[in-house]
Amino acid sequence: MSGNKAVELQIQMKQNAEDLQNFMKELNNWEEEIKKKDQQLRTGNINEPP
């Protein structure tokens, strides 16, 4: 593998890792929102926008 290809591969791997990390953060945030909404529905404590 040429040096240029190796650098391109490293850059792509770093970008993929960053994308995955961002996706996992968003998924965690979504999960927390759903847990809160679920708890509100279970307790009847719903604050829906008008």
Image: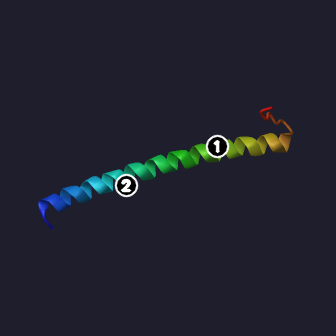
Residue 41 picture location, percent across and down? 82, 43
Secondary structure of the residue carrying tag 2 is helix
Q: Name the image quarter holding the N terminus.
A: bottom left
Q: How was the colour assigned to the protein in this rendering?
A: rainbow
- Could you tell me the amino acid type at mark 2? Asn
- The residue lying toward the viewer, choosing from 24 and 19, is 19
Secondary structure of the residue carrying tag 1 is helix
Left or right placement of residue 29 versus residue 36 in this view: left
- The residue lying toward the viewer, choosing from 4 and 40, is 4
- Are the residues at dot 2 and dot 1 in contact (C-beta closer than 8 Å)? no
Q: Residue furthest bottom?
A: 1
Q: Residue furthest left?
A: 2
Residue at the (32%, 52%) spot, across then down: 14
- Could you tell me the amino acid type at mark 1? Glu
* Mark identifier at residue 17: none
Left or right placement of residue 23 versus residue 15 in this view: right
- Identify the residue position indicated by label 1 in the image: 32
| Quadrant housing residue 44 | top right
- Identify the residue position indicated by label 2 in the image: 16
Q: Which of the two discs, 2 and 1, sits closer to the camera? A: 2
Residue at the (57%, 46%) spot, across then down: 28
Residue 25 picture location, percent across and down? 51, 45
